[in-house]
Image (cartoon, rainbow, N blue to C red):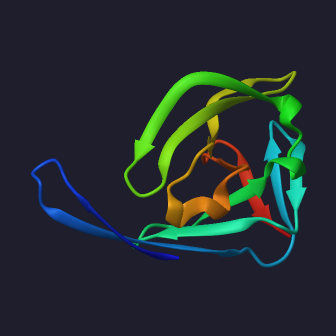
Amino acid sequence: MGDLETTDEKGEKMTSTIRIRKADGLWVVRAAGAVIGESRNALELAEGDGAPVIYFPRGDIAMAFLEPTTHRSHSPTLGDASYFSVTSTAETLKNAAWSYEAPASDAEAIKDHVAFTDSVAVEQL
């Protein structure tokens, strides 16, 4: 999508490249053995040299399984993230999903999308 120039804690300039593209194929999210979402409209976000992250449209996720938490984080390139615990009858995975409600301008495509930590299985079928 673009290069964002920010400064680190020492005031030195840093550039982060964000790339967002449609993720090919069908993607599934499983938690505690249950499918909580599947999408052909998922997005893949890659930032710098980091591993890509799959973002699912909220409409493709069974949001009843996601409970908002008070946890928040901030990315200078993406914005402020809100977190969710993924709940099931078997277990609760605390802060296992996140979403950028008002992402930075270069990341607008992930608005109304949800990503998951490694504690939840995200698979391409």
Residue at the spot 71% in from the left edge and 67% down from the top edge = 43
Residue 2 appears left or right of 108 = left
86 and 16: which one is in front?
Answer: 16
Q: Quadrant of the C terminus?
A: bottom right
Residue 80 appears left or right of 35 = left
Number of disc labels: 0
**Going by the picture, which residue comes out furthest to the front?**
105
Q: Is residue 76 above or below residue 34?
A: below
Residue at the spot 50% in from the left edge and 67% down from the top edge = 51
Quarter of image, res 21: bottom right
* Residue 52 percent location from the top left of the image: 56, 68
Q: In this rendering, does residue 54 appear at all?
A: no
Q: Is residue 32 above or below residue 77?
A: above
Q: In this rendering, does residue 23 appear at all?
A: yes
* Residue 121 percent location from the top left of the image: 73, 51
Residue 23 appears left or right of 65 = left
* Residue 55 percent location from the top left of the image: 69, 58
Quarter of image, res 74: top left
Residue at the spot 68% in from the left edge and 25% down from the top edge = 68
Residue 59 appears left or right of 121 = right
Residue at the spot 45% in from the left edge and 37% down from the top edge = 73
Q: Is residue 64 above or below residue 2?
A: above
4 and 51: which one is in front?
Answer: 4
* Residue 44 percent location from the top left of the image: 65, 69
99 and 109: which one is in front?
Answer: 109
Q: Is residue 69 above or below residue 84?
A: above
